[in-house]
Amino acid sequence: MATAEYARRIRLVHTPIWIPSRLVEFAYYFAVFYSLMSEFLGIEIPLVASAIMGLTAGFCLINFRLHSKEVLAPIALLLACAVSFILIQVLVHGESVLGESERTFINWTLGMIVVQSLCLRDGFSRRCVIVLFALGIVIAIPHLQYTAGVERARLERSVAANLSNPNALAGWFGFCAVYSAIFGFETKRMAHCLVAWLLTVVCLFIVGLTVSRGVLIGFALAVTFAGRRVLGRSFVPIFMFLILGGVIYETGLFMHIVNLYTERGMEETGRELIWPVAIDRVLNAPYGTLIGVGASATGNYIGGSYLDGVFKPIYLQPHNSFLYFLLSSGIVPLGFYVLFLIYTAGKAIAPEHRADAAYRMPLLLYTFVNAMLADLPFMAPWGILSFCIAAGYGIPYQVQNLVLVRRRGGIRLGRPHSNSKMTDSAAHT
């Protein structure tokens, strides 16, 4: 007697978990907007942005309850880095909890909790990049000015996230350029691809105005790694990119920027002098390797010059996140930070089928290059998003429908067809 074929639809349901609502997402956008624009517009009220971010993070943790550990597991090493840094500064170096460095790390911790939670929302990363790009355009375009010497674009007014610094401004738009370029590789719609490439060109043009070398290196590495996957799958995105690049080259839009980069390549920055001075300070300080010299003492004396007959000493910050952690707080926060990068790189490079899989390693590469040339660039909103995307999600944000099919050859799983008349029921064991 022939064995009848039948199938049952089942749902692979992971442990039930709360997903942040759109109101939580809007609260995060408002906190970022206020933190950036309040000082810019002259309406700053101390600790308001931090309070909003803290309440949002607390709301997420309360709703996650026992699942908080699973949600935050991918960024646990970063959280340990931040907590150990704050404890060393307060308990060992006598810094205030509300000191500038400590508040920066507290805000970074709260921001990571919120963003990691919001990454469970489908499409959050794309929407967040659009918001960051729009904020950058609103802040940057009307208020760009050029520095003396090599013409480098910077903001004429003080802005949070250190955006008044040309390198920080470049890092912001460089991140948007990396994300939009990868989106152009990944999307299958020609209209979306074209918009993504145009957005990439706009971002790179602003980066070029700042004459920031490290950001361009990070962009090149990130896009090259992202293109590795595309070259084996589709020729059209690369072909469109080459055509667009050729058109831009013929217009001469970037020729002035190329000349500025050539001029700045001969400029002395003094960064090569910082490493030996900083390492010598760590080795000579009491327990310097274990606890550093304190966040308030990370400036390194590299000489000075006479101005109107008065000697002016020159102090430079480390301009490197690894050196900053070692100098300010020793090997414990640095160890957590290095372990996060190694662990996340190992996960990000592995094949995966999540929606953001194509972005993970390129964004980690981009952030890493920026962190090699600046103290704490990953504490900006774009850096937090980049690290959270690269770290991945502890819990999937969607439930998959599968079909359990029993046939003569055995049992297999498959996806249900849209016209299937199978009934939802649990499969019998």
Image (tube, helix red, strand yellow):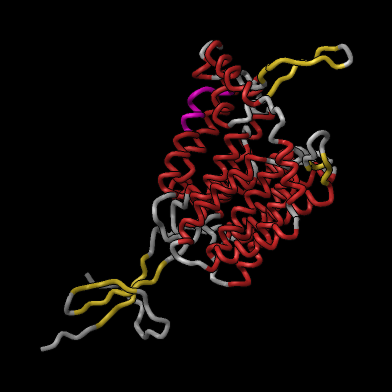
**Quadrant the C terminus occupies:** bottom left
Location of residue 242 by image quarter: bottom right
Question: Residue at the spot x=85%, y=12% of the render?
Answer: 310
Viewer-side residue, 35 vs 383:
383
Q: Is residue 371 magenta?
A: no
Viewer-side residue, 150 vs 365:
150
Q: Give the vertical position of 236 relative to 248 (above or below).
A: below
**Quadrant the N terminus occupies:** bottom left
Q: Main secondary structure of the magenta part?
A: helix
Residue 358 in the image: x percent, y percent?
49, 57
Q: Is residue 334 magenta?
A: yes
Q: Is residue 242 visible?
A: yes
Q: Give the vertical position of 113 relative to 313 (above or below).
A: below
Question: Residue at the spot x=71%, y=40% of the render?
Answer: 262
Residue 371 in the image: x percent, y percent?
58, 37
Total number of numbered discs in the rendering: 0
Q: Is residue 65 visible?
A: no
Question: Residue at the spot x=71%, y=44% of the render?
Answer: 169
Q: Give the vertical position of 424 relative to 26 (above or below).
A: below
Residue 219 in the image: x percent, y percent?
59, 48
Residue 40 in the image: x percent, y percent?
81, 44
The magenta segment is: 328-336
Q: Give the vertical position of 101 relative to 182 (above or below).
A: above
Which residue is outermost to the left? Answer: 1
Viewer-side residue, 169 vs 89:
169
Which residue is outermost to the right? Answer: 308
Which residue is outermost to the bottom? Answer: 1
Query: Residue 17 vs residue 407: left or right?
Result: right
Viewer-side residue, 25 vs 162:
162
